[in-house]
Amino acid sequence: MEFITHGLVWYINLLLAVTLHEAAHAFAAHLLGDSTAYEGGQVSLDPRPHLKREPFGTIWFPIISFILQGGQFMMGWASAPYDPHWALRYPRRAAWMAAAGPASNLVITIFAFVLLKVGLSNGFFLLPNKMSLTTVVTGGAGMAASAGLMLSVMFSLNLILFLFNLLPVPPLDGSSILVLFLPEELAERYTEALMRSPFLSIIGLILAWNFAGYLIGPVFQWAVRMLYS
C-alpha cells in the first residue's frame, strides 16, 4: 500500500512539474515571437496536451522508472512544439525559451523549500528517521504526514529536474542556454549544429544519465542541510 501511495504522490508531482516546465517554455516562446505551442494549447496547467503528445514520457516511463528504482524515484518528460526556423533565426530568443523550463522547476523547488522550512520551524514537520527523496521531512500522522510526503517529493523532484535540465548536453535545456554566453555568429552556428545532429542527443542523454548524480547528489545534500540549519 505504501508503494502505491508513494507512486501516486510521485506521479502527481511529476505531472505538475513537467506541465509547468513545458508551459513555461511555450509561454516564453510566445512572448519572444513563436506562438506554435501557445496556439496548440500548451500554455496551460492542464496535463492532457502533454499526455497526448508524449504518452511514453508522461505515463509509461514514469511507471517503469518507479518500479525499477524500487519506489524511491520517478522520472519522465514532456515536450512543447516550436518553430525550428524561428529558433535558427533568433538563437538567443530560443535560449531564453529553453531557460524558462528549468526556471519553473526552480520556482517550485523554492516554494516547497519555504513551506518545509516553515513547517519545521513550528514543529509541524520533524526530522525523519531515514532521509530519502520521498521523506525529506516526516509529519507523524494525519495531515502533517500527508503534507510532509507531498512537499518532500515536490522539493526533491523539482530540484532534480532543475539541475538535470541545466546540464549542457543536447537535448537538455542546458545545451540551448549555452547560446546566451556565445558570440552571435557562433551562437547561430552552434544552434544549427544542434538541430541538425540528432545523434548528439543520444550521446548527450547517455552522458547526462551517467554523470548527473555527481551534480545532483551534492546539491541535494547541501539543500537539505540548508533546510535543517
Image (cartoon, rainbow, N blue to C red):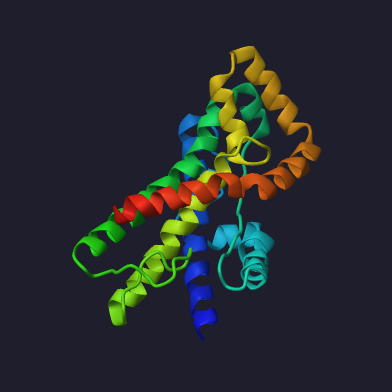
Residue shown at 31%/82% (left/top)? 141
Relative to 140, residue 24 above or below: above
**For this view, does 228 lie left or right of residue 182?**
left
Q: Which of 35 and 200 is in front in this view?
A: 200
Coordinates of residue 17 in the picture (x, y in percent) = 48, 56
* Above or below 167: residue 139: below
Give the vertical position of 64 relative to 170 (above or below): below
56, 219: nearer the viewer = 219
Q: Quick one: which residue is furthest to the bottom in this view?
A: 1
Drawn side of residue 56 relative to residue 6, left or right: right
Q: How far across and how far down the image is residue 164, in percent?
A: 57, 46
Q: Relative to the observer, which residue lies in front, 180 or 109?
A: 109
Location of residue 103 by image quarter: top left
Q: Which residue is drawn at 63% across and 61% down?
A: 52
Q: Is any atom of residue 43 visible in this view? A: no
User: x, y (%) of residue 83?
Assistant: 64, 35
Residue at coordinates 55% horizontally, 63% vertically from top-left?
Answer: 48
Q: Where is residue 221 in the image (x, y as percent from the top left)?
A: 45, 52
